[in-house]
Amino acid sequence: MILHSPHDSPDVRPDTGDTHCCLCLPHEAATIAVGQALAPLLAPGLILWLDGDLGAGKTTLVRALLRALGHAGPVKSPTYTLVEVYAVSSLYLYHFDFYRFNDPEEFVDAGLGEYFRTDAVCLVEWPAKARGYVPAADVELVFRFPDAPADGRILELHARSEAGRQCLNSFRSCSGVASLFARSVLPFSSP
């Protein structure tokens, strides 16, 4: 199975030499393990973009992340509400979903910019739908389906800022994902 490729998707930015890694997620439990490993690494002000097709695992990862932080209530996709708000472990988390946007300006019309604060973590699904208005990602997570759907998912993680690099470097050293890394992380090829 190929676990890396040049960035040929319009929703994935070209490699800029930033810190990145690629994981094979053969089942839902692997996606949950990634969310659990990311949870303690979240710091106020961090923005994570989650991109990928419908059903690729974006909300599953957010749910696992919130559960690992101690949230016991429901975690649903904010497809219709645009944002779900969580206060966990003295951390404000805002989970956005822009899938239903027809125009990026809907981000401004809905007043969503006020949520992107230095005391909150923002988790953004479908960021391309608000392109030009949604603040830049610190960490971008791109879910893809491999050629053989039975092989689960492929998750590319890209650091897009210094805070993102720190987060991703810490993530790489997490024991919770060590077995995933041992089997599936390959460096990206240069285009």
Image (cartoon, rainbow, N blue to C red):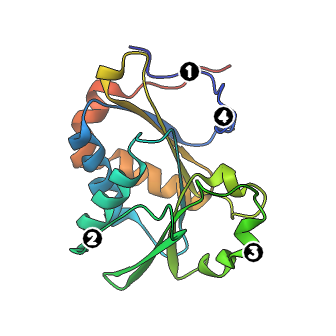
Helix, strand or loop under label 3: helix
Q: Which of marks 3 and 4 is in front?
A: 3
Q: Quadrant of residue 2?
A: top left
Question: Relative to 165, is 186 above or below?
Answer: above
Give the crowd class for mark 3: few <14, some 14-19, many >=20 residues within 10 Å: few
- Tell me which label, 2 or 4, sits earlier in the chain: 4
- Tell me which label, 3 or 4, sits earlier in the chain: 4
Residue bearing the label numbered 2: 74
Residue bearing the label numbered 4: 15
Whether residues under marks 2 and 3 lie with C-beta atoms below 8 angstroms apart, the answer is no
Q: How far apart are marks 4 and 1 (CA)?
A: 10 Å
Q: Residue 126: percent from the left, percent from the top?
A: 58, 51
67 and 82: which one is in front? 82
What amino acid is found at the position of numbered circle 3 in the picture?
Answer: Asp
- Tell me which label, 1 or 3, sits earlier in the chain: 1
- Tell me which label, 2 or 3, sits earlier in the chain: 2
82 and 140: which one is in front? 82
Helix, strand or loop under label 1: loop
Residue bearing the label numbered 1: 5
Q: In which quarter of the image is the N terminus?
A: top left
